[in-house]
Image (cartoon, rainbow, N blue to C red):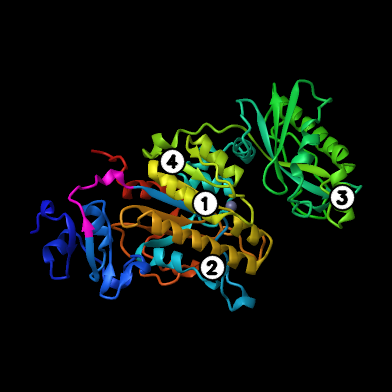
């Protein structure tokens, strides 16, 4: 037996070092996740300066030859985890693409590398067949049971947009949209307007509600055609229906009280007046004249949906004993992280849109994982391509996400730490909407059995070694791997 004290400096070890191999069960070489660029002609070089446990994990194949180490043993609980949520990643096979899904079509060497040496399985965001919204699915992935904690998406968006929500406020998700004179929706996203929305938001923010006394409105543009509205005042309720009919060609809906309460009646009356006034304020806006001249759809109304109140979440730290930070350009995810007491890193260039700065995100993950032991990263782009029915776009965004995965697994040291990757739901391009399919999930890092899956896909995930789990199972599994789970029983 080799004493760990004797093992500082550079040590060449061979498969004949049976004592070491018993101490640190090694994998066969084909499942080794060691960085390809660190290969040497003489074999595979795994370098680490941190500790013995790193070696155990870094030298995770018989061909890993040279190992640098120091005799300090890192406590189990110092491990970290990164969770990457790829919004809408999963899809269904398409007949016109040789029965392949965008994920199967995409070239994703880094996801494949993570999958090969890690746990791979299927995940039902809520439960089998349930079509989940991003909000409830993200709650579940972070370990919060939506049945217990979900209080509507609007509040999460408002928090993420930097509005200080108070108890009693009711917040709404909004879209700038295009309607005709008959209030029929021509385009729910006003031609996916990207520029000038903060100017439009100014006139909408100034709207005063006359028909219902004692209500103030706060309105803010967020990403692309999206915005948030907060109603502040006495006797408000989130139990009101949406104005957004969610389909083009339909007339806008009238908001109604869902539970017949006085509060809900007041709230829906305020919303109906707000929507009417938004049309009056935006119709003649100079920006819309410009858009008309350029042949673009006018952003001539604000449609509301997803009423919500501030959720009462126990802190993420109290649930999992992990200090978390969040890297996302999507207000809903940022709001959720804030409500869970995580630090939200403001990443310049993380847009929450179809084009985002993956380099900046990768840097933020590396920085975040230095003083936090849990980093949540969220990428929205594949979901947008899915909603747009854009196969090529989805393939491209998945390949871009793969680059981000490469950065993360190279820098975060998956010999010591864990990187999990999954989706919040499927957004198949053939449907342009969320479906209730299970999504792939990978957890890579030390001590996990290698799946030996060669290519990450919806189908290979079904043959993986993790089986089929639910969204709520993910955080307990990660917490246990990083060594921070509490003992159940005694
Ligand atoms: Zn989503």
Could you say which is closer to the camera, residue 232 or residue 487? 232
| Quarter of the view holding residue 451 | bottom left
As measured in the structure, the alpha-carbon distance from the residue carrying label 1 to the one carrying label 3 is 34 Å
* Region rendered in magenta: 68-79
Residue plotted at (44% across, 44% down): 368
Dot 4, how many residues are within 10 Å of its Cα: few (below 14), some (14-19), or many (20+)?
Answer: many
Tell me which numbered mark, 1 or 2, is placed earlier along the sequence: 2
Tell me the residue that label 2 is attached to.
103
Task: Determine if residue 126 is in view.
Answer: no
Quarter of the figure with the N terminus: bottom left
Q: Please say whether residue 211 is one of the residues in the magenta stretch.
A: no
Q: Please say whether residue 70 is one of the residues in the magenta stretch.
A: yes
Tell me which numbered mark, 3 or 2, is placed earlier along the sequence: 2
Tell me the residue that label 1 is attached to.
361
Tell me which numbered mark, 1 or 3, is placed earlier along the sequence: 3
Determine contact: label 1, label 3, CB under 8 Å: no
As measured in the structure, the alpha-carbon distance from the residue carrying label 1 to the one carrying label 4 is 16 Å
| Residue 358 locus on image (x, y percent) | 54, 56
Residue plotted at (26% across, 55% down): 54
């Amino acid at each position: 037996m080799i004493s760990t004290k004797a093992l500082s400096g550079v040590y060449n070890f061979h498969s004949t070092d049976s004592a070491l191999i018993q101490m640190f069960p090694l994998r066969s070489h084909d499942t080794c996740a060691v960085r390809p660029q660190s290969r040497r002609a003489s074999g595979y070089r795994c370098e680490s300066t941190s500790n013995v446990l790193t070696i155990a994990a870094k030298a995770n194949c018989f061909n890993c030859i040279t190992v640098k180490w120091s005799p300090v043993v890192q406590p189990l609980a110092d491990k970290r985890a990164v969770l990457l949520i790829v919004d809408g990643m999963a899809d269904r096979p398409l007949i016109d693409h040789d029965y392949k899904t965008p994920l199967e079509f995409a070239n994703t060497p880094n996801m494949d590398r993570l999958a090969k040496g890690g746990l791979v399985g299927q995940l039902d965001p809520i439960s089998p067949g349930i079509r989940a919204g991003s909000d409830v699915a993200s709650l579940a992935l972070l370990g919060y049971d939506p049945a217990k904690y979900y209080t509507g998406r609007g509040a999460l968006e408002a928090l993420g947009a930097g509005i200080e929500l108070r108890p009693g406020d009711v917040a709404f998700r909004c879209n700038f949209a295009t309607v005709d004179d008959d209030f029929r929706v021509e385009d729910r996203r006003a031609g996916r307007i990207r520029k000038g929305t903060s100017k439009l938001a100014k006139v909408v923010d100034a709207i005063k509600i006359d028909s219902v006394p004692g209500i103030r409105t706060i309105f803010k543009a967020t990403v692309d055609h999206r915005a948030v509205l907060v109603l502040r005042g006495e006797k408000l309720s989130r139990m009101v229906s949406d104005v957004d009919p969610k389909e083009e060609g339909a007339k806008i809906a009238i908001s109604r009280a869902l539970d017949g309460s006085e509060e809900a009646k007041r709230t829906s009356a305020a919303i109906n007046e707000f929507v009417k006034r938004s049309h009056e304020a935006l119709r003649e806006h100079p920006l819309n004249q410009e858009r008309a001249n350029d042949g673009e759809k006018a952003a001539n109304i604000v449609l509301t949906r997803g009423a919500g109140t501030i959720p009462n979440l126990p802190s993420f730290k109290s649930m999992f004993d992990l200090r978390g930070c969040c890297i996302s350009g999507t207000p809903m995810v940022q709001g959720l992280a804030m409500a869970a007491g995580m630090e939200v890193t403001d990443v310049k260039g993380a847009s929450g849109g179809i084009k985002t700065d993956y380099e900046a995100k990768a840097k933020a993950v590396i920085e975040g994982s230095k003083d936090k032991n849990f980093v949540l990263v969220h990428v929205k782009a594949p979901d947008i391509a899915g909603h747009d029915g854009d196969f090529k776009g989805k393939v491209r965004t998945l390949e871009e996400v793969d680059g981000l995965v490469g950065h993360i697994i190279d820098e975060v040291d998956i010999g010591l730490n864990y990187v999990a990757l999954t989706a919040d739901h499927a957004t198949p391009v053939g449907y342009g909407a969320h479906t209730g399919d299970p999504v792939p999930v990978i957890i890579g890092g030390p001590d996990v059995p290698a799946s030996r899956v060669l290519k990450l896909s919806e189908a290979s995930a079904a043959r993986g070694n993790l089986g089929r789990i639910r969204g709520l199972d993910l955080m307990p599994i990660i917490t246990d791997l990083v060594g921070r789970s509490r003992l159940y029983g005694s």
